[in-house]
Amino acid sequence: MAKKILVVDDKLEIRKLLKSYFTSEGYEVVTAADGQEALFVARHEKPDVVLLDLMMPEMNGYDFLRAFSRESSTPVIVLTAKVEESDKVLGLELGADDYVVKPFSPRELAARVRAVLRRMEKAQKEMPQILRAGEITLDLQGHYAKVRDQLVDLTPSEFAILATLISAPGRVFSRLELLERLQGVAYEGYERTIDVHIRNLRSKIEPDASKPRYIETVYGAGYRFAPQEKHA
């Protein structure tokens, strides 16, 4: 079955361009002109990935992310003309999995889409279906996380990073390794996105994010999941 992409952009020419390109690549494509319409389309069409412009009327991309990330784990790739790092970081903090700066190459964007879909499928196939450490439980098939038996909302990227770290306690993963797990290819200059995802993860799973119990920083090397004591 063809994977479905939701393209969200207020510019008709971009919607037409991306629909034509991805249709020719074998995807099913649905579109929306603003965030409000995108929420409606996403709820009914259940896309596998969302390509999202940030600057739109009615409801912009940031507001869409705030609403969409609360109800879906579908990965979102932001398409933006905003090049300031703060804008990119804000998008990631709100739940985006990746970003591509306009003007972009459709081929590069297609590679990002394939990578995010491949990453999700690979994680589901290769890892045990249930991962546990300390007070954390990850259900890879159901795609949910619990901390102290309470459900925790994680974005697809946060979920994938946590699953990678928790599956190999004590092993140090560099930022580039984690980025490659997310995207399939490690793009230079994008390591900063890992720091944002880690900060978000800690705020959601750590008893005290300022003194991490689970995700440790190994300065100059990357991050690792601290081995947890096993209790009888």
Image (cartoon, rainbow, N blue to C red):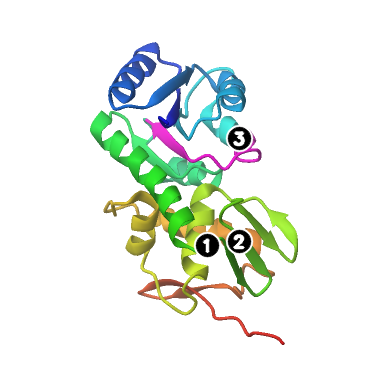
Question: What is the C-alpha distance between the residues marked 1 and 2?
Answer: 9 Å
Residue 89 falls inside the magenta stretch: no
**Circle 2 sits on which residue?**
138
Query: Looking at the rendering, in which quadrant would you find the N terminus?
Result: top left
Q: Which of marks 2 and 3 is nearer the N terminus?
A: 3
Task: State the extent of the magenta-drawn residues as a range.
Answer: 66-80
Q: What x and y, as percent, mark residue 167?
A: 49, 70
Q: Which residue is drawn at 36% across and 19% down?
A: 19
Question: What is the C-alpha distance between the residues marked 1 and 3?
Answer: 21 Å
Q: Residue at x 60, y 25 (%)?
A: 39
SS of the residue under disc 1: helix
Q: Is label 2 or label 3 in front?
A: 2
Query: Looking at the rendering, in which quadrant would you find the C terminus?
Result: bottom right
Asked if the residue at tag 2 contacts the one at tag 1, i.e. Cβ–Cβ closer than 8 Å, the answer is yes
Residue toward you, 82 or 131: 131
Residue 75 falls inside the magenta stretch: yes
Q: Quadrant of residue 186?
A: bottom left
